[in-house]
Amino acid sequence: QVQLRESGGGSVQAGGSLTLSCVDPKNMHNLGCMAWFRQAPGKEREAVATIHFSGTATYTDSVQGRFAISRDSAKDPLYLKMNNLTSEDTAIYSCAATSDFDFGRCSLPGVDSFVTYWGQGTQVTVSS
C-alpha cells in the first residue's frame, strides 16, 4: 500500500522560498510518475508540476521558472523547490503518484486522471 507523506510547508513572506518533500520509504522505486497539486481556498485543485521516472518534468505556466520538481533517484523523496513565492501561491499542496510508468501520460494537462495515490497535503501560506 502506497502511503505518501508530505512535509516542508509553512508560512513565508512574498519573495521567499520553501521546499516541499514527499516520500513513501517503501515504495518510491515503484512509482513511475509523481506530481504536485495545490488547492487554494475557493478554487479548484490544479496540477503544478509532474516528473516521470526518467526525470522529465512539466510545469503549469504560473510556476514555470519559479518552481522546480525533482527526484534524485528512484529511492529518493520527491521535492518541490518554490522560489519567489507570491500570495497567489497560498494553497494546500499535495503530492500524488502512480505505479504506471507511461511516459506520455506523466505530464500536464491530464495528470490528475493518471495518478492514483495521494498524500494528505501540507499548507503553504505566503504573506504579502
Image: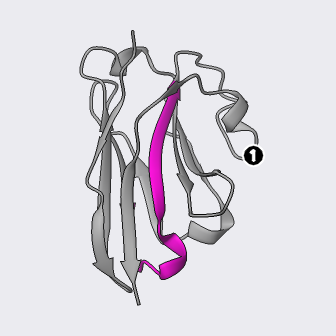
| Quadrant in which residue 60 is drawn | bottom right
User: Which residue is nearer to you in this view: 72 or 109?
Assistant: 109
**Whole-percent x, y for residue 107 in the image:** 67, 41
**Whole-percent x, y for residue 125 in the image:** 38, 70
User: What residue lies at 64% left-to-right and 34% top-to-bottom?
Assistant: 106
Query: The C terminus is located in which quarter?
Result: bottom left
Question: Which secondary structure, mark 1?
Answer: loop
Query: The N terminus is located in which quarter?
Result: top left
Which segment is the magenta one?
81-97
- The residue tagged 1 is 109
User: Which residue is nearer to you in this view: 21 or 125?
Assistant: 125
User: Which residue is nearer to you in this view: 101 or 120?
Assistant: 120
User: Which residue is nearer to you in this view: 94 or 41?
Assistant: 41
| Quadrant in which residue 16 is drawn | bottom left
How packed mark 1 is, by other alpha carbons closer than 10 Å (few <14, some 14-19, many 20 or more), is some
User: What residue lies at 29% left-to-right and 36% top-to-bottom?
Assistant: 77
In the picture, measured across the screen, residue 95 lies left or right of residue 104, that is: left
Is residue 53 placed above or below 9 in the rendered structure? above
**Whole-percent x, y for residue 27 in the image:** 34, 15
Is residue 83 placed above or below 76 in the rendered structure? below
Residue 38 belongs to magenta span: no
**Whole-percent x, y for residue 68 in the image:** 44, 58
Residue 90 belongs to magenta span: yes
